[in-house]
Amino acid sequence: KTATSKSASSKSAEEGSVHLLRIGVGLSLLVGGLLGLLSLGNPVLDTTATALRDSGGIIGAIVAVPLSSLLGTVGSAVVLVAVAATGALVATGTSLARVGAALGVTWRSASGFVNRFLELDASSDAESDDLNLDDELESAEAEEKPARKRRATVETVVTPDVDSEVQVDAPEPVVAVVPQVVTQEVLPEVEADATADEQDGDLRLDVSVPAHTNWELPPVNLLRLSQHKELDTRGIEASGAVLEQTLRDFGVDAQLVGMTVGPTVTRYELELAAGVKVNKVTGLSHDIAYAMASADVRILAPIPGRSAIGVEVPNKQRQLITLGDILTSDEAAKATHPLEVGLGRDIAGTSVMLNLATMPHLLIAGATGSGKSSCINSIITSLLLRSTPDQVRLILVDPKRVELGQYNGLPHLLTEVVANPKRAANALEWCVREMEMRYELLAEIGARDITGYNAMFDRGDLPTAENPDPLGGRNYDRLPFIVIVIDELNDLMMVAARDVENSICRIAQMARAVGIHLIIATQRPSVDVITGVIKANVPSRLAFSVTSIADSRVILDQAGAEKLIGQGDMLAAPASGRPARVQGSWVDEDCVRKVVAFWKRQVTEVQYVEGVQGSENGSSGATGDAEDGDDELLMQAMELVVRSGLGSTSMLQRKLRVGFARAGRLMDLLENKGVVGPSEGSKARTVQMTVEEFEEMQARA
């Protein structure tokens, strides 16, 4: 132990002396070069005391006089500038690669600024030309006004083209503010099974799409819209009077102060008299349900932000809420993020949009037939209507082989719909590796998250295939969001519980910053499926109707889901805040098929990412045996890592032209052989083999 401490102290002392020596040599070169340049700047190289004082002193004269006699003034200046620059690099420990990268970024920023300035100048010239042209037209307008009126009348009457009529009428749904008005105008066209080609000029969602994309978003007219139904105000008021009288019969002095009619339930708002306990109302839930001839009622005590109690009673006639109703609402028009999806309508009739980027992960649970699968279909269809494959990519896991198979062939998919539970575990492990690769990429360019990275890419701050680095550095691509949808967690936990839970927890803990989001659904809300670790890392939940209060507490950590009435009725609980009652939107299979067919027509063949599902018999991670991979490829990877001194998986992926899963397997094999150290998160692995050791190993082979 003493010998070890002595060797460590001697090693640190040697490193400190080397560091001081490097700084001393660098400063000497820097000072000598600068003093020599000052002496060269003297009009007459003179060694008198006055000349030495006015120039670089004795040291400057010692450096400049011999160089000037040998190389002349210009040659001496070039040499001294190089010496001073070398001294600065040595003293600061800066490598030429970092200097080149900084120069490349500066060059790209300057060129982008010049291009924007030239475009602005050209646009201002064009505007001035337009103004001059407008002045000329206005001067001639008085003479040609009658003729122009006649020509306009003829054009309006003679136009018989059907396509032009569709384009003129198309913007009307956008102007409409009330969803019911849109329903009455658009619904007959959708019911007529109009194709996407016929409706291509109709209403489209206004979302942010990258300017360089070649994809076209489907029109929202592919979705059906519901028909508006008149409210039975007399029946609702009569039920409110019955509620008030029932409370008086049980000795509760309460006054009905308001009613909110939602698509599924009606909330009656009550104010209690002074001295009346809230518990007296909550304990009468069964009596209230009996008096109002309802299956069950849910009591919200109190209503958040108000001194009132809410009694939610199911409506006798429920209103169907379709996904088209949500995506044509004002709330959807204000939502521009590609991960904002239509969820449903709350009890006040307001459309609810869910931003997966801020959730950032979602747990959906409920009994069979409660509307869980319809919610998943609505979320996926919303993503397909609002985002392109350049923005969002999907991994769909469907062990039940029932719901998600209809999405096969989409260009958004990273791989085919995963039906095998073992392959699903491999896909989750691939996502973990992709997450680590993205963190390495963000650390490499100094970005905080995927939003900052894509902003740098869109501004042109990063070299791309179209705008490569002039110094020969790597090129970058835009990173899409990745959404992983697991339709039945229970089936995965039965096959590979440990691997699935570890992958889910790792993704849930770290993947938000790199744009990877989880949507987990299960119809068995028990503690052995929704474990405490999963609940701790997935705080946002959607609870559908369940059979017992225990299941509700597993999902929401509180009661309430057992009071729901099914068919899309849910409690939406964000990461912070109380659950809100929402009627989920519904989308039928015919509309889903139309949206999927619209995307399939834009591609001839879907290019899946290799290695996402791995192999059925084992994990996609590396084993300890080198025979699992190609020996020649492993040697190439070893040479790249050793000679570059960088243990980066993304570097192997780029240089060897392999997928990320294969590059990660090669890196694990190199770790087992002692070439690189263990993984350190977003940092590159340390290289433990020297170039001499690698060359000796090659010579022995």
Image (tube, grey):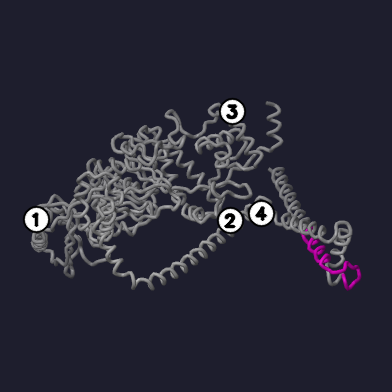
Q: Is residue 465 left or right of residue 483?
A: right
Question: Residue 538: where, in percent of width, then height?
Answer: 37, 48
Whether residue 31 appears in magenta in the rendering, the answer is: yes
Q: Secondary structure at mark 1?
A: helix
Q: State whether residue 462 is above or below residue 401.
A: below
The residue wearing badge 2 is 108
Q: Quadrant of the N terminus?
A: top right
The residue wearing badge 3 is 631
Q: CA distance from mark 2 to mark 3?
A: 40 Å
Which label's residue is closer to the chain start, 1 or 4? Answer: 4
Indicate which disc residue 291 carries.
Answer: 1
Contact flag, marks 1 and 4 (Cβ < 8 Å): no
How would you classify the magenta stretch by its main secondary structure? helix
Q: Secondary structure at mark 3?
A: helix
Which residues lie in the magenta part?
27-51
Q: CA distance from mark 3 to mark 1?
A: 78 Å
Which one is nearer the viewer's eye here, 504 or 536? 504
Q: Residue at x 83, y 67 (%)?
A: 56
The residue wearing badge 4 is 99
Q: Inspect the image, locate mark 2, and give the three-letter code of the amino acid beneath it.
A: Arg
Q: CA distance from mark 2 to mark 4?
A: 14 Å
Indicate which disc residue 658 carries.
Answer: none
Contact flag, marks 3 and 1 (Cβ < 8 Å): no
Which label's residue is closer to the chain start, 2 or 4? Answer: 4
